[in-house]
Each structure stands twice: as structure tokens, then as C-alpha cells.
Image: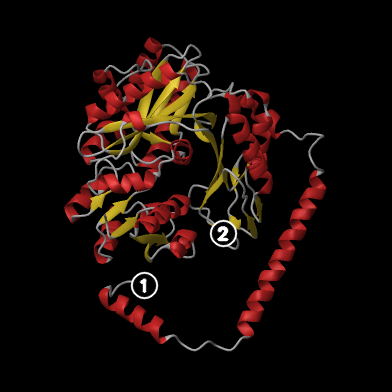
Amino acid sequence: MFKKLLIANRGEIAVRILRACRDLGITGVAVYSEVDRAALHVRMADEAYPIGPAPSRESYLRVDKLMDIARRAECDALHPGYGFLAENPELPRACAEAGITFVGPSPAAMERLGSKTAARELAYRAGVPMVPGVREPIPQLETARRIASEIGYPILLKAVAGGGGKGMRVVAGANELAAAWRDAASEALNAFGDQRVYIEKYLERPRHIEMQIFGDSYGNVIYLGERECSVQRRHQKVIEEAPSPFMTAELRRDMGEAALRLAREAGYTNAGTAEFLVDANRNFYFLEVNTRLQVEHPVTEAVTGLDLVKLQLRVAAGERLAITQQDVSLRGHAVECRIYAEDPENHFFPSPGQIISWREPHGPGIRLDEGVYSGWTVPGDYDPLLAKLIAWGADRAETLARLARALEELEIAGIRTNTALFRRILAEADFQNGAVHTRWLDERLASLLAPREKDADSRGEALEIRVAMIAAALWHAAQAKFASEQPAQPASRWRDDGRREQISRLPDRRP
């Protein structure tokens, strides 16, 4: 097993990986930008190193800086998390050149599957059903017009290097294509540094269901069941669950085997996810492969009993998969909510700022993967994901009841979040019955955000929040004043000696 792991990420996923390192006895090394100096993942890490200014292009997206820190910290492995450079083949290539193990697929497999168009070509060769569309990037707008007319509207423009709904536009008719083409290409360039897009037929009201796959370096590859990801806002997943309430044993087997054909065709190792669209008749179509750990991996962990991050580390260290396909069984049901610092009532505008108070939910079947704490100032420079709230139960009804209770217990003051929206979604009859599709939330959003008579008086509730925030601010001020009036503590020779030793080994490391 590895001795030292560099975590090339931030927030809740960095914390999640650090916890797995602690379980395995691996020294966890964090990196942080200037605004993340006091972040939770930095506080939890065994070692932490500055990586640059707040903009991700000057910090978390710098392969050269990551490699420099990995070498100076004497790391023997690197975990990319998700987002940032997690699906950029330049990072595993740089790791290989530096003699550092990359926790993920090979650069070749990443290129075969990470590019959406290359993945479609591979799926075509593997005989996996696909949504009608093209298997290569569209070079110019006029070509897009011709292809769109051949496929028939509505169509979907998608970034070749896309993910998370970035660089994606639904086009209902020919008159919308030029503007959508310009916007998709511009967003893709800003998000991924690659403005290329391609075209797929837009399916009306499909479900988004994905298969978790895992492969080792000895040719063994398995699937770990599916996740239902149909509750989305503008193509961005909001709620995920496992297993899918729409799934049958036959459909699970067929989709799983299709995912394995893709993985074997690409020579895939480590964790990955094959994503599919499924119509009302349970016909499924290949969408894309995410060549990394997914945000929603905890629901798969909950129903399989497996720790996917530990599994990633063991496979990357050269171990064989300890389980076969016959060993995989699903137990109970799990649902995850993504808690964002955003204001749903103000067009989901980000809500950075200081978290005045943070109270976590507890009880049977509840898990919170968090990246923040009370007193932390949420920066406005990155994705506003604060935490993931996961509930598990013996069946879906128990899971939803536990999740609703946990959402009531979760208290976050000082910033706006989307927790109230989750409570309303969970109360919807369609959601309770599992009757959702990828457009369901967008279609229901106006109604879900509308004021309701049964809600608590909004002015009274707002007043309570303001009073709590003022009280918390006064408490923090009093604590700071008290600390400033205390006599200075004697210096710790043990601590200072340790710092001097680290500085001598890493002369350019900043305290």
C-alpha cells in the first residue's frame, strides 16, 4: 500500500479521500489555494501545501504545480478526486513520468472514454445501444445545421470534453441553433479548455441511469449496480439514488453487461461510470463514461457495503479485485442530496460567505460527507457544493422518511442553501412514486419554489435566522476579544523543532 498520497482537489471529496487514507494508514497530503488556507481538507490533512491564487487555472488546474508538490512531499501516489484535472490525461501522464502512481485509469483508457465522441465510437464497436447522433466533433456551424436537419429537432449540443451539464444546450428548432452553438462552445472552452461540441438526438423525458464499474490490472472488471440520476436542474444532477425504482433484474443485467463491454474494449482499470438514457419502454442508450469517481458514489457504497475510495487505492496499488460479479449484492435503498451554497429563490445565484452556524443531522442510516464547518467562509471561486447528505434504509419508503428527517435537522446559518427545495421535492407525489425524468425538476421548479400557505411565516422565520446570526456573531467577537486578552502561551520547542525539520527538507514550503 502507498505511504503518502497527494490529493489534487479540495472540498468534500478531498475530505472523503483523507478519511480513507486514515483508515489505511496512508499519510494524506493536501493542496490549497489562497482562499482555501483554512479549509476543512487542509485542517484534516497530515501535510498541506499552497498551490497558488484562488482562480483554479492558477492553482488546482496546474499540473506542473501539483507535480512539484508531489515530488517535494515525497508522495508515491496521487488521487484526483472529481472535477478539476480528474479526467485530463495529462495528469496521469505527468504522474507516470515522475514515478508517481495515479489513482485512476490509464491515460490511454481515459482518452478512449473521456472524450465523449471517442467514447461513442468505442460504444459503437462494442455493440452498445446509442442515442442517434454523430461520433465526432462538429467542425463548424454549417455542418451542425446539416446534421441537425438530418437527425431532426429537438437536438442536444454537447461538449466533447464535457461533464456536469457544462457546454450543453437543447435546441428545439433551426432558429435557435446559432445562439446555442455559440453559447455551448464558449461555456465548454471556459470550463474545459476545449470548445469542440457534437450533436445527439434529444430524447423526450428519458431517465438518466448510470452503472458503476470497477476494473483491476489483471483483466477483472465488474459492475456494482446502478444509480438513478434523473432529478436534474439544467442537466446538473441534484438527487441520486440506488437502486433505481424503475429498474428490473433483466434491465440491470443488460445495462451492466453493456457497461462491461465498454470497459473491456477500453482496457479500463479503477473506478468509472457508464451513463445511459432509458426511455419509458426500458430501452437504454449509451450516453457517456465518466473516467473518475462520481459525486454520487456514496449511494453505491451504502447499498453494496463497499468503500469505493479504499477499493480505488487497493487497485491502484496493484491488488486484485477481492470480489467477483457473483459477490455483488444490493441491500436496502440509498438517496443522496447535494447541498449547495446557492439561493433557489434568486435564480440559484451562488451564496458565498461565512457559515455562522452548522448543525449536522444524526441518527440511523444518515451520513454527511461535508467539506465545511461553522465559521468557515465559503469562497465564491469554485463550485458551491458544501456537502452531500445521504440516507439509507431497508426500503425506499424508510430511506425517504429518514432523509426528510435529516433535512429538518440540518441547520446552516449565514448563507443561503437549497435544503428547503429538497424538502419540497421529497414531498412531491411523483418523486415519492419514482415517476421522474430528466426534465421533471425543470418543469416543476416554478411550482416547487412558489410560496405556500402551509409553510412557516417567512418573515418570522427570517427574523429568527437574523437573530441567530447576530447572536453567533456576538459570540465569535467575544471569543476573539477573550483570546486577545490572554497572556501569550509559552513556545512549544517540540512543535518548533518539527517545523524547522520540515522547512529544512522543503526549503520553499510556506508555513
Which element type, helix, strand or loop, lies under badge 1? loop
Q: State left or right for residue 176 relative to residue 349.
A: left
Q: Which residue is mark 1?
A: 510
Q: Residue 400 at x, y = what percent?
A: 62, 34
* Kind of residue indicated by mark 2: Tyr
Q: How many marks?
A: 2
- Relative depth, front residue between 499 and 258: 258
Type of colouring = secondary structure
Q: Quadrant of the N terminus?
A: bottom left
**Residue 207, image x and y in percent?**
49, 22
The residue lying toward the viewer, choosing from 40 and 213, is 213
Instruction: Please state which of the two labelled residues, at mark 2 or mark 1, is closer to the viewer.
Output: 2
**Residue that appears at 78% across and 54% down:** 464
Residue 31 percent coordinates (x, y) = 38, 60
Image quadrant where residue 449 sits? top right
Q: Residue at x 49, y 53 (%)?
A: 381
Q: Is residue 260 above or below residue 133?
A: below
| CA–CA distance in space, label 2 to label 1 | 24 Å
Q: Is residue 384 left or right of residue 106?
A: right
Of callouts 2 and 1, which one flags the residue occurring earlier in the amino acid sequence? 2
Which quadrant would residue 159 be assigned to in this image?
A: top left
Q: Determine which residue is flagged by label 2.
A: 373
